[in-house]
Image (cartoon, rainbow, N blue to C red):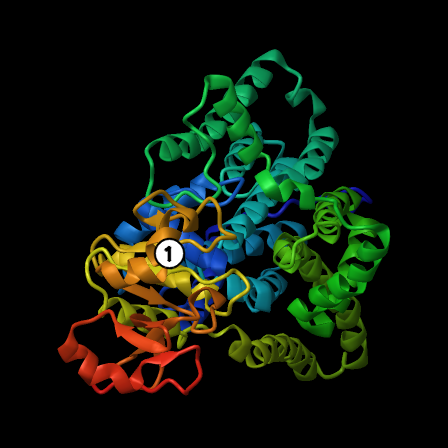
Amino acid sequence: MTKTQSTEQPVITRIVLLAALAASLLALGLYLLTLHPGVGPSLDSMELQIAALVRGVIHPPGSPQYLMLGSAAMSVLPGPNPAYRLNLLSAIFAATAVGVTFLLTYRLTHGMAVSLFASLLLALSPRLWYQASIAELYSLNALYVSLVLYLLVTWHQTRQPAAYWAATTVYAFSFGNHLTMLLLLPVFLYTVESTDRAILTRPRNLAITTGIVLVAAAQYLYIPLRAAAVSPFCNYCPNTSGTFIENGRALLDYLTGGPFKSQMFALSLREILERIPEAIGLIGRQFMPWGAALLVVGIWELFQKQVEYAWMLVLGMVAEIMFVLAYAIPDWHDFLTPVYVIATPLIGYGTLQLVEKIHPEIETLFKSRPSTRNLTVVGMVVLMAAALLTSFYAYFPAVDQSEDTGYMVNSRALLEQAEPGAWVLMPHPNSPAFYYSWAVRYTSLAENLPPDLSLVAAPEVDPPPGPEPTYIPWSAAEDALILDAMREGDQQVFVLDWADDRFEDWGLLPVCVPDTDAIAGYEVAAVMEDGHPTPLVDSTRWAAIESTVVFDGSEPFVCPAE
């Protein structure tokens, strides 16, 4: 074995592929146990569920590939509702990433046991596990990171051009899901330099590479096409109604991050340094202390024995970590998922090195007792299984989303009371009910319940995440919501946050989830004028509900008996 790479290259045999498949299926079975049953739980998840449902557009830079795949998944995958099917797609992506990471680890270790151990440790890491249970971009991103690295390592080992072109194609298309794949560019260029630098400079290859990049870039035509089609959902929608130059500038701004690009590399040196201990702790939390220790061993040993592979993996980890540490967003920890994927083969390599150091010592100690030597192998397997079971036991309750039906049940109960053309008023973004308003929007679109429902955006949400009548800007609806207009009109209105200061003179009727005391929202049933309530419903209904209508939250809300 040389300092640069092993003299024997592993062959991916049928049994190795079956082992990788087994790792994927085990991971998929795990993720199905914790899969979210419907809409939610996070704002980003609901944004993706709405956009995939109506072939809409999400916040910059857009992730068009995910939206197209998600739309197809909602149509073809099994499951009780479209949101569940999109969640299931995340589970499939993450489980496939586990299998590919098994193959990547095997490429470096030549050992199936340590590869299985490391890949299942990744499957049980709480961040990937959670992302595999909900609709999110990160599980597909994890798959792309593992697949690009596997193909690059395969090319470096075999020198087969097909592996290079596969890596180039996968890498180019990965940008259609998440532009942070740019952070793997140092790994890609280093692999080219250390394997065959001329492959990029040959005119024919350069032309093919350019063609691949252009075809992959065409994924982003989805954004202006769907924006121009006036999709019911278009969050941070790029302008398509101006001149060609104006539209081009708007699209470029959108594709480069829009309002979010100012948050990249926006933290001060002090703030970055303050994040480092937390980032280290997050890595340790994914793999438990023993996994973190094996990671350190793997990095050290790989630099000693296979330095080119060590640089490939460490360059990827460092680039990802440097970007995340300086990214000024609340959920920065989600962007560490590629780091956990890259760390996995290093953990596998560290495990292999530890086993290779311990095993000869045990053989020497028990050389006169062969049966005892066999027990040591069993003991190592038991230790690996115990480590995996510990992760399962520790993290299952935290990642389990399988019983989280609140948004789905509540939004359906609210919308069943709504008439066609009803309005639901979106709360302020700092309201606890703001996320819930996105679940209401999803449920109404998914179940057409009721037809023509409109969400009136909060004043801070301007422009709204969709055109009229799906969303109505606050400025366009405000005049229809003053007391005189409410009294004289027949617009049915619902609110989701009783404490909203815009509605102090409204009488709110709780809409309750059947057979529970849970309140799904509030119908505006009256307005207060000169100290007296003026009903907005007919006299018969008012007589039935008057005692349960509350103004200003001055009394406890009680579910009506009607």
Q: Is residue 407 left or right of residue 429?
A: left
Nearest the camera: 265 or 283?
265
- Relative image position of residue 423 (x, y in whole percent): 30, 58
Front one among 257 and 281: 257
Residue beneath disc 1? 86
Residue at x 41% of width, y 26% of height? 241
Using the rendered view, name the quadrant where residue 447 is placed.
bottom left
Counting from the top left corner in percent of width and height, residue 350 is at 74, 62
Label 1 residue SS: helix
Q: Quadrant of residue 420?
A: bottom left
Residue 158 lies, with reference to residue 444, above or below; the image says above
Q: Is residue 53 visible?
A: yes
* Above-or-below relation of 145 to 360: above
Residue 191 in percent (x, y) is at 70, 35
- Residue drawn 56% across the image and 69% down it: 124
Q: Residue at x 56, y 62 (%)?
A: 128
Mark 1, other Cα within 10 Å: few <14 / some 14–19 / many ≥20: many
* In front of the other: 214 or 262: 262
In the image, taking residue 48 as reference, residue 3 lies left or right, namely: right
Q: Amino acid at mark 1?
A: Leu
Q: Residue at x 52, y 72 (%)?
A: 399
Quadrant including the C terminus: bottom left
As drawn, is 554 to the left or to the right of 231? right
Q: Residue furthest top?
A: 203
Q: Position of residue 216 (x, y in %)?
A: 48, 30
